[in-house]
């Protein structure tokens, strides 16, 4: 599969479909497989660019300081390497935070912006949950059943977990995916970057037409965060002209 080197790191990427470019920015645990179900649908209408961000999957995994700015700068450099002047930017979970950073830092490269289950600043409850992810990954590893169970409980709706595609098969599949995409050190570094970030000052700088989308049962990045956080509702109210779409019965 193709790779390209940007900002000193070798990144794996793939392109699917044709049309206006869409750049997918994945969440903190899953690499490009985060979009395994979405990409084929998007590719019917768009040139979809999936990649493993620095630290994940088949891309280089350097031990370094990680931040939303590091990943956003890599995303911009990848578009440059692929000769893509502007793209629709679609980020999910941590990728949504990277997308906020990207749109604020690179408005000239951002066509439209989709923020999927994103947060701009974790509240105290979310930081507690993230601390739990860190301690579980350190104790058992990122591919452990223990971490997969914790993430499944916090991020997937009860109705899905109890349905035909949920249960132990789903949790075991999640553990396998987490183990393939992560090392413990970088999983922890990403969690620490999420826990300490504050993207609130960037939101009013975003110029792209923006859609904020998320589930009404999301407890990981809730629509309404605690007073010390900035959840999906805050993002939708603060990004100029942003639209919101609430998915009923969906979690993270």
Image (cartoon, grey):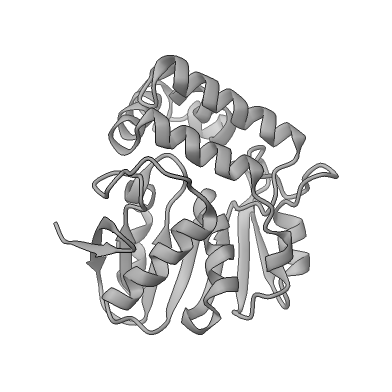
Query: Where residue 198 sits in the image (x, y, percent)?
Result: 69, 53
Residue 161 horizontal side relative to residue 203, left or right: left
Of residue 209 and residue 248, the one placed in the foreground of this image is 209
Image location (x, y in percent) of residue 147: 46, 23
Rendered view: 142 above or below 187: above
Q: Is residue 89 above or below residue 64?
A: below
Give me the residue at 39% from left, 26% from top. Answer: 142
Residue at image position (35%, 51%) is 54
Residue 201 visible in rendering:
yes
The quadrant where residue 218 appears: top right
Taking the spot 41% from the left edge, 71% from the top edge, the residue there is 76
Give left or right: position of 71 versus 241: left
Farthest-out residue, right: 227
Quadrant in which residue 7 is drawn:
bottom left
Q: Pinpoint residue 248: horizontal percent, then vertical percent.
A: 64, 49
Q: How many marks?
A: 0
Q: Which residue is depicted at the point 39% across and 33% down?
A: 165
Taking depth in this image into account, of 216 and 151 the one nearest to the observer is 151
Tell me: 68 left or right of 31.
Answer: right
Identity of the residue furthest to the left in this view: 1
- Quadrant of the snapshot with the C terminus: top right
User: Depth check: 214 or 66 in front?
Assistant: 66
- Tell me if residue 250 can be seen: no
Camera-side residue: 48 or 79? Answer: 79
Query: The N terminus appears in which quarter of the rendering?
Result: bottom left
Q: Position of residue 121 (x, y in %)?
A: 70, 49
């Amino acid at each position: 599969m193709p790779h390209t080197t940007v900002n000193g790191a070798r990144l794996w990427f793939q392109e699917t479909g044709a049309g206006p470019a869409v750049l997918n920015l994945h969440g903190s645990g899953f690499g490009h497989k985060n979009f395994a179900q979405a990409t084929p649908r998007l590719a019917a209408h768009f040139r979809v660019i999936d990649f493993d961000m620095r630290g994940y999957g088949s891309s280089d995994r350097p031990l370094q300081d990680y931040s939303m700015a590091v990943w956003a700068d890599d995303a911009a450099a990848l578009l440059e390497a692929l000769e893509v002047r502007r793209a629709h930017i679609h980020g999910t979970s941590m990728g949504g935070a990277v997308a906020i950073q990207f749109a604020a830092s690179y408005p000239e490269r951002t066509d439209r912006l989709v923020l999927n289950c994103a947060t701009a600043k974790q509240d105290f409850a979310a930081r507690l949950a993230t601390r739990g992810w860190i301690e579980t990954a350190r104790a058992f590893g990122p591919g452990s059943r223990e971490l997969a169970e914790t993430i499944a409980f916090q991020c997937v709706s009860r109705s899905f977990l109890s349905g035909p595609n949920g249960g132990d098969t789903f949790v075991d599949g999640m553990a396998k995916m987490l183990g393939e995409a992560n090392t413990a050190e970088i999983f922890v570094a990403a969690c620490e970057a999420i826990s300490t970030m504050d993207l609130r000052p960037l939101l009013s700088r975003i110029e792209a037409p923006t859609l904020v989308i998320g589930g009404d049962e999301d407890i990981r990045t809730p629509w309404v965060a605690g007073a010390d956080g900035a959840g999906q509702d805050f993002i939708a109210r603060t990004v100029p002209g942003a639209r919101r779409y609430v998915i009923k019965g969906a979690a993270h």
